[in-house]
Image (cartoon, rainbow, N blue to C red):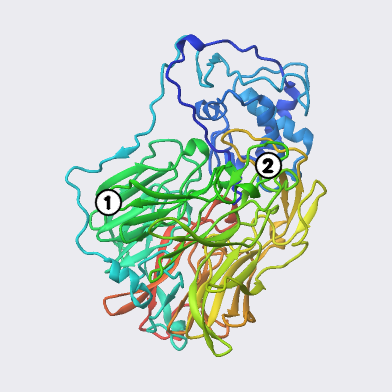
């Protein structure tokens, strides 16, 4: 998935003292460009990178962190200029002129010690191919910027394994494997998508179409952290577990009172600072971190049991998804296609995080699928990230994985072939990681149209016969349902506007719908067996794409291969589409004035719960789409929505507050869990 941020790259060295060499610093820009750059920066960049280049929702652009992020020996000043002019502002680089892009770079360079002169900075101007030279500092042969007086001899690599808190043991309450296998019948919310099948369906019916108008907030908990808040809560035995990118928090599921909080301080470089949740089994909670660790906590106390570094952030890998636990295995894969990772999904022992098996979603030489990558220019290629939850058939051991886009994005003339296993449903033996079958749904992707979901798996009747099916959805705005026996697509139903969807991106600008952020994002479809409907949230937002003639790989930075200009936000919209699970026919649609990112959850009470970016939580009639209840939570909704029973009462918990800086518009809010329940009063007795 395209995430327009500048990522951090770190190079380890063993000795630098003898490698220090001064680098002559050319004058690359004029003082007039710097003054112009300050104005352009405040208008187009400061909202993300901070008023004084000091950072905000996007990284700082001055100081030691910025210097370190551009310290790789292969990076040049022209690489910085290229990245700024082709990707900034995010998804709207064309809104800034070439002259203004150059002026912003001049401002950034001067703020980092470069001197102005008489040469005007422009594309192709002399001196841009120089490596960086920071004021008063020199570059080592290993790419580390060090002081002129004293060179750093080494850097400390993050620990590969942390044994955890002294004496810490797993909790004693469960749930055990039998409970997880039967989660579809549970009144708890035991997995990120409710159950191994990923249905997002709860059998609870205490809250239903007859009384949904009586919903009211029961409690709320503000997490107290600035965050990209996308958590999907899980609930077990009266306790709710939620996450930020650093924290894991246990709450009383009926009162929102905190029970414990564990805070992870990154041991290494972080890539994408967001997290979507945890997995639970046998008293253990397991989650991933943006600096590449898996960690396990005692579910009762939050004590650290172990932490193991299993992803490499130097290669752009990071964890954003909620893992799954099955038997003694933790199942997870790294995000980061735009960082040119070499994607994989892996299984790790739940007892200590040690690796059990790995399947490469970007095949290596000698592995099946390697031949589907044609590379006439010999450029770096990769992608195949994993960033949404899996589904498992616990009877057959089929593990269903959604694999994301190839890298570099867009220039398919450079990246020829089908590019397996990108944009594919991949089905593995959950215990061994062996490939059972796959189906690629967007071959040779040029639009960044990740396959995002291979959930739910379900059984329904078609022409009088029971069929075992799996629903798939992605950023191409299509809901496809596949027969798991014949592996044929039964139907493909659009859930967004489709325009030029069959045209590959070329060096000529092409407007396509959905765009780079369109279709189904990190929250996927739900299935209600009572209504026999699939419910799909979607982003309807078009983009003008242009592929570059050549792709430029800059270590540790976004590797896009083209530019993307989104339509103005007011031209975007969102949908929840209800689709007949047997035929693919659309039964109803709910339109939102902004993209739909929040989860959809359906129940035995014939309800569908979801949320909107303006902050409204909604309860809809699952059969008709009629809105039965609406409440503004005070912040944009883009995270999880779950329902469960605590004591004898049914509750609904929602994640409210900035899903990311890009999506918030005028309704950012603060990361908050809001819990709803039925009020004793009738709606007419309550204030509006």
Residue corresponding to mark 1: 351
Q: Quick check: 363 above or below 299?
A: above
Dot 1 alpha-carbon crowd within 10 angstroms: few under 14, some 14 to 19, many 20 or more: some
Picture residue at 18% right of the left edge, 42% below the top: 166
Sequence-wise first label, 1 or 2: 2
Q: Nearer the viewer, residue 313 or 347?
A: 347
Q: Left or right? Give the position of 75 relative to 523.
A: right
Q: Number of labelled discs?
A: 2
Q: Which mark is residue 87?
A: 2
Q: Left or right? Give the position of 105 relative to 223.
A: right
Where residue 10 sits in the image (x, y, percent)? 49, 30
Dot 2 alpha-carbon crowd within 10 angstroms: few under 14, some 14 to 19, many 20 or more: many
Mark 1–mark 2 distance (CA, rounded to whole Å)? 42 Å
Q: Quick check: 216 above or below 4?
A: below
Where residue 153 sits in the image (x, y, percent)? 41, 16
Picture residue at 55% right of the left edge, 41% below the top: 58
Q: Nearer the viewer, residue 350 or 302?
A: 350
Q: Is residue 618 visible?
A: no
Q: Is residue 404 visible?
A: yes
């Amino acid at each position: 998935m395209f995430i327009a941020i500048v990522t951090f790259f770190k190079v380890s060295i063993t000795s630098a003292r003898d490698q220090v060499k001064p680098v002559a610093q050319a004058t690359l820009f004029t003082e007039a460009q710097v003054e112009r750059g300050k104005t352009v920066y405040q208008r187009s960049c400061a909202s993300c990178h901070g008023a004084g280049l000091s950072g905000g929702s996007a990284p700082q652009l001055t100081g030691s962190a910025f210097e370190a992020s551009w310290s790789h020996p292969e990076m040049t000043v022209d690489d910085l200029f290229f990245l700024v002019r082709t990707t900034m502002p995010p998804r709207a680089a064309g809104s800034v002129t070439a002259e203004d892009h150059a002026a912003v770079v001049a401002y950034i360079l001067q703020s980092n010690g470069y001197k102005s002169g008489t040469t005007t900075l422009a594309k192709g101007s002399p001196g841009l191919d120089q490596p960086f030279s920071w004021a008063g500092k020199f570059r080592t042969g290993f790419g580390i910027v060090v002081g002129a007086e004293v060179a750093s001899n080494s850097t400390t690599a993050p620990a590969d394994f942390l044994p955890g808190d002294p004496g810490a043991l797993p909790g004693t309450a469960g749930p055990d494997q039998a409970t997880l296998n039967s989660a579809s019948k549970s009144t708890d919310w035991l997995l990120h998508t409710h159950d191994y099948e990923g249905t997002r369906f709860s059998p609870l019916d205490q809250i239903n179409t007859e009384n949904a108008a009586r919903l009211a907030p029961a409690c709320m908990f503000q997490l107290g952290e600035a965050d990209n808040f996308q958590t999907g809560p899980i609930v077990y035995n009266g306790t709710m577990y939620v996450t930020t990118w650093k924290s894991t928090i246990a709450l009383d599921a009926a009162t929102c009172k905190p029970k414990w909080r564990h805070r992870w301080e990154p041991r290494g470089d972080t890539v994408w600072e967001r997290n979507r949740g945890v997995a639970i089994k046998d008293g253990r909670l397991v989650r991933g971190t943006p600096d590449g660790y898996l960690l396990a906590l005692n579910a009762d106390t939050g004590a650290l049991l172990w932490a193991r570094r299993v992803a490499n952030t130097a290669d752009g890998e990071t964890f954003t998804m909620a893992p799954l636990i099955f038997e003694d295995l933790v199942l997870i894969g790294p995000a980061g296609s735009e960082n040119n990772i070499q994607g994989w999904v892996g299984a790790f022992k739940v007892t200590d995080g040690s690796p059990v098996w790995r399947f490469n979603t970007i095949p290596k030489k000698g592995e099946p699928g390697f031949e589907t990558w044609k590379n006439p220019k010999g450029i770096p290629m990769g992608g195949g990230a994993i960033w949404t939850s899996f589904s498992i058939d616990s009877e057959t051991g089929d593990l269903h994985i959604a694999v994301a886009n190839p890298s570099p994005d867009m220039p398919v003339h450079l990246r020829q072939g089908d590019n397996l296993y990108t944009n594919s449903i991949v089905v593995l033996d959950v215990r061994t990681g062996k490939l059972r079958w796959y189906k690629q749904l967007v071959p040779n992707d040029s639009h960044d149209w990740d396959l995002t979901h291979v959930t739910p798996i379900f059984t329904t009747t078609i022409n009088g016969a029971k069929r075992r099916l799996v629903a798939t959805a992605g950023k191409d705005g299509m809901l496809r349902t596949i027969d798991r026996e014949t592996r044929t697509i039964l139907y493909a139903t659009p859930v967004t506007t489709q325009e030029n969807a069959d045209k590959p991106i070329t060096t000529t600008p092409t407007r396509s719908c959905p765009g780079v952020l369109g279709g189904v994002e990190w929250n996927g479809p739900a299935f209600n067996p009572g209504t026999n409907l699939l419910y799909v949230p979607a982003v309807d937002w078009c983009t003008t794409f242009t592929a570059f003639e050549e792709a430029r790989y800059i270590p540790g930075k976004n590797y896009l291969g083209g530019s993307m200009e989104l339509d103005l936000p007011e031209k975007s919209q969102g949908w929840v589409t209800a689709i007949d699970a047997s035929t693919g026919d659309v039964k109803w649609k709910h339109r939102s004035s902004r993209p739909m990112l929040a989860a959809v959850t359906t129940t035995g009470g014939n309800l569908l719960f979801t949320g909107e970016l303006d902050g409204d939580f909604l309860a809809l009639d699952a059969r008709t789409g009629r809105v039965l209840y609406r409440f503004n939570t005070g912040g944009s909704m883009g995270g999880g929505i779950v329902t469960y029973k605590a004591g004898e009462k049914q509750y609904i918990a929602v994640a409210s507050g900035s899903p990311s800086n890009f999506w918030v518009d005028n309704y950012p809010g603060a990361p908050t869990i809001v819990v709803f329940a039925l009020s004793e009063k009738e709606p007419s007795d309550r204030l509006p």
